[in-house]
Image (cartoon, rainbow, N blue to C red):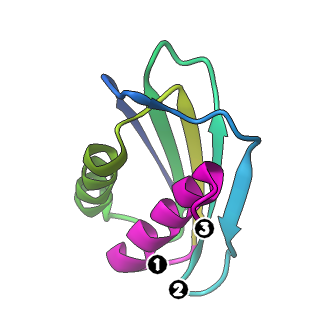
């Protein structure tokens, strides 16, 4: 297992809904927990993954996600079992949309 941590500043969208979990931890999938948190305007993402050595890919996917949503005061926890970047993006977008009531 590998744990990766990212912190993005200068977000503008704050989520106020209760925490949400989307996805399921299983082969080729992942679980995303998204919750509001007092982080001085930042968005933090912690990833626990079984796929060791893919840090640069995770970073690119997380940067793309942050640029799309610009979340602030949001904590995201991901438990991954080898999801592809497309599945990661899908689940993360699903989590935000659920929080916004767009799902």
From the top left corner, tell me how far across and down residue 76 is, in percent. Answer: 56, 44
From the top left corner, tell me how far across and down residue 67 is, in percent. Answer: 25, 45
The residue located at (52%, 69%) in the rendering is 91
Q: CA distance from mark 3 to mark 2?
A: 22 Å
Which is closer to the viewer, label 3 or label 1?
3
Q: CA distance from mark 3 to mark 1?
A: 21 Å
First to last magenta residue range = 81-103
Which is closer to the viewer, label 3 or label 2?
3
How would you classify the magenta stretch by its main secondary structure? helix
Residue 51 shows in this picture: no
Q: CA distance from mark 1 to mark 2?
A: 4 Å
| Closer to us: 28 or 3 | 28
Which mark, residue 103?
A: 3
Is the residue under label 2 in contact with that under label 1 (CB below 8 Å)? Answer: yes
Vertical placement of residue 20 versus 10, above or below: below
From the image, tell me which residue sits under label 1. Answer: 83
Q: Is residue 64 left or right of residue 30?
A: left
Identify the residue at the far top of this view: 40
Q: Sequence order check: which comes first, mark 3 or mark 2? A: 2
Q: Is residue 46 magenta?
A: no
Vertical placement of residue 21 versus 69, above or below: below
Helix, strand or loop for disc 1: loop
Vertical placement of residue 9 versus 3, above or below: above
Classify residue 102 by image quadrant. Answer: bottom right
Q: Sequence order check: which comes first, mark 3 or mark 1? A: 1
Q: Is residue 7 left or right of residue 27?
A: left
From the image, tell me which residue sits under label 2. Answer: 28
| Closer to us: 2 or 19 | 19
The residue located at (55%, 33%) in the rendering is 74
The residue located at (30%, 56%) in the rendering is 55
């Amino acid at each position: 297992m590998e744990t990766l941590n990212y912190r993005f500043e200068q977000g503008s969208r704050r989520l106020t809904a209760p925490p949400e979990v989307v996805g399921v931890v299983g082969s080729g999938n992942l679980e995303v927990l998204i919750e509001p948190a007092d982080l001085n305007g930042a968005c933090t993402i912690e990833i626990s993954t079984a796929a060791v050595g893919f840090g640069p890919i995770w970073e690119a996917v997380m940067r793309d996600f942050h640029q799309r949503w610009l979340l602030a005061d949001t904590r995201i926890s991901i438990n991954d079992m080898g999801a592809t970047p497309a599945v990661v993006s899908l689940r993360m977008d699903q989590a935000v949309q659920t929080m916004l009531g767009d799902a």
